[in-house]
């Protein structure tokens, strides 16, 4: 059974139950009001009969001070009235010819409906009955009308249930239609978020956000595959070439063999480094790294030891001047961020020239005295796989053009602003400025 059918049945049953309850409650309430009113009139009439002498029953009519008394005078002449003592019944007044046919409650006699009551007055038991044929007929007519109303309510509840269900299911059908047309090549489709602040609008917003995440994920996956295929083509070709050399004549020539094996090892190391960088970049684009608040003193100390091990022949100078005491970020990815710029400084400057890391207030400044960046290239260096002129590399180390893209992603995640100040043949200065929210003095 479809959800729309289930919802329609639930709405219909709920509306029907409410309607039935309302009709039955009104019918029972009306019946009780009429019966109670007639019972009270009979009681008052009996009390009047017992409290007044026969000759005083008739009083002047009208709506003056004695109106209620005159009313009960009239009603007292229209009731059955008897006294019961022991097992005998003394009928005092019987305008309906009931005789011994009296019954407590509602009973019939001669085609008429009567209401009988028993009451005690001055220690004696009296019986009274009044004609309620017109009232009972009204109750019966109302009961018939009630059943007709119930039948009408059933029809209305079914129609209303179908209408409300279709109205409420309409947005969901629109969702299903749009979702059914979405595939990996059409993730750019979005729901139109409109209307009031209700659950439907929240669902549309959530689905749009989900589609954006899916589109971004598929795009990252597609770009990763394309990038990997693009960058692996050259080293794979190189490895294949050296393998063919070995197969042709390298095994008989030790020099050629050693040269080919060294080249293959170097190429595979480059491939491994490039794949690691691609994976890091992919993780940064799909998963937000964890964040913690850590001490900058300890982090700088670890960074100094790490860079000394990685570049043992390079002089790296650390300067700390009123640097922030704490940073909210990931120490691991912050190491990668600084390491990318130090690695570039190492590649593009002479070995004997120093690299300066200046930690000042909420900035980290990485400065080298190498070849610098050509005018017009600064705006492209953070593009993926962008490479500067290879002849500018001072240490014969290849570059994949991925490191600065990784640095850019990390900086964006932690709100770090990157400024590049470079002059040809003078050097480059990279300024990393931390957001005041992520750093504490």
Image (cartoon, rainbow, N blue to C red):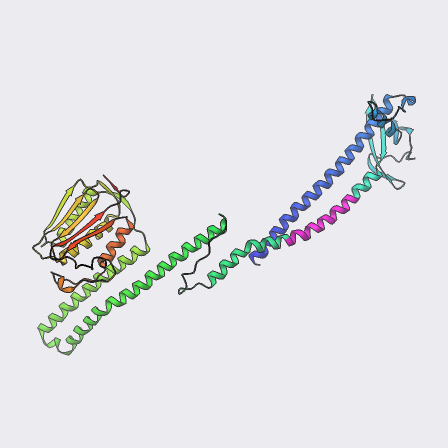
72 on left or right of 387: right
Across and down, in percent, residue 181 comes to 46, 64
420 on left or right of 163: left
155 on left or right of 225: right
Foreground of the two, 236 or 256 = 236
Is the stretch drawn in magenta largely helix, strand or loop?
helix
Q: Residue furthest bottom?
A: 248
Across and down, in percent, residue 247 comes to 16, 77
| Residue 212 showing in the rendered view | yes
- The span shown in magenta is 141-159
Q: Quadrant of the N terminus?
A: bottom right
Q: Residue furthest left?
A: 352
Q: Quadrant of the C terminus?
A: top left
> Does 199 sit above or below residue 225?
above
Foreground of the two, 195 or 228 = 195
Task: Identify the residue shown where x is 84% and y is 39%.
Answer: 133
Across and down, in percent, residue 227 comes to 27, 64
């Amino acid at each position: 059974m479809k959800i729309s059918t289930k919802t329609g049945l639930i709405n219909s049953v709920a509306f029907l139950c409410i309607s039935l309850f309302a009709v039955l409650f009104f019918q029972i309430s009306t019946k009780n009001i009429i019966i109670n009113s007639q019972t009270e009139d009979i009681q008052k009439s009996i009390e009047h009969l017992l409290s007044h002498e026969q000759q005083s029953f008739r009083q002047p009519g009208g709506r003056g001070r004695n109106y209620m008394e005159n009313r009960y005078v009239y009603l007292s002449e229209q009731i059955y009235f008897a006294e019961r003592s022991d097992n005998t019944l003394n009928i005092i007044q019987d305008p309906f010819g009931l005789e011994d046919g009296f019954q407590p409650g509602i009973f019939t006699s001669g085609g008429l409906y009567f209401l009988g009551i028993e009451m005690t007055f001055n220690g004696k038991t009296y019986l009274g009955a009044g004609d309620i044929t017109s009232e009972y007929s009204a109750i019966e007519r109302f009961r018939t009308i009630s059943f007709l109303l119930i039948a009408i309510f059933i029809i209305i509840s079914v129609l209303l249930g179908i209408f409300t269900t279709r109205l409420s299911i309409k947005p969901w059908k629109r969702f299903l239609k749009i979702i059914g047309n979405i595939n990996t090549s059409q993730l750019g489709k979005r729901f139109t978020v409109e209307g009031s602040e209700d659950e439907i609008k929240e669902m549309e917003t959530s689905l749009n956000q989900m589609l954006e995440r899916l589109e971004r994920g598929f795009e990252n996956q597609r770009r990763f595959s394309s990038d990997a295929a693009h960058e692996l083509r050259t080293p794979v070709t190189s490895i294949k070439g050296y393998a063919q050399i070995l197969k042709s004549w390298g095994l008989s020539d030790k020099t050629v063999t050693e040269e080919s094996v060294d080249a293959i090892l170097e190429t595979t190391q480059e491939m491994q480094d490039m794949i690691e960088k691609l994976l890091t970049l992919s993780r940064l684009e799909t998963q937000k790294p964890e964040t913690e608040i850590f001490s900058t003193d300890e982090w700088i100390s670890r960074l100094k030891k790490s860079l000394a091990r990685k570049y043992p022949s390079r002089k790296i100078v650390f300067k700390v001047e009123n640097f922030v005491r704490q940073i909210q970020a990931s120490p691991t990815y912050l190491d990668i961020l600084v390491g990318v710029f130090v690695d570039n400084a190492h590649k593009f400057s002479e070995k004997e020239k120093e690299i300066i890391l200046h930690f000042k207030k909420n900035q980290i400044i990485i400065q080298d005295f190498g070849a610098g960046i050509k005018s017009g290239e600064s705006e492209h260096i953070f593009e993926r796989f962008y490479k500067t002129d290879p002849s500018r590399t001072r240490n014969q180390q290849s570059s994949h053009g991925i490191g600065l893209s990784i640095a850019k992603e990390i900086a964006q995640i932690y709100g770090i602003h990157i400024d590049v100040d470079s002059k040809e043949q003078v050097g480059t200065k990279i300024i990393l400025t931390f957001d005041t929210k992520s750093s504490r003095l």
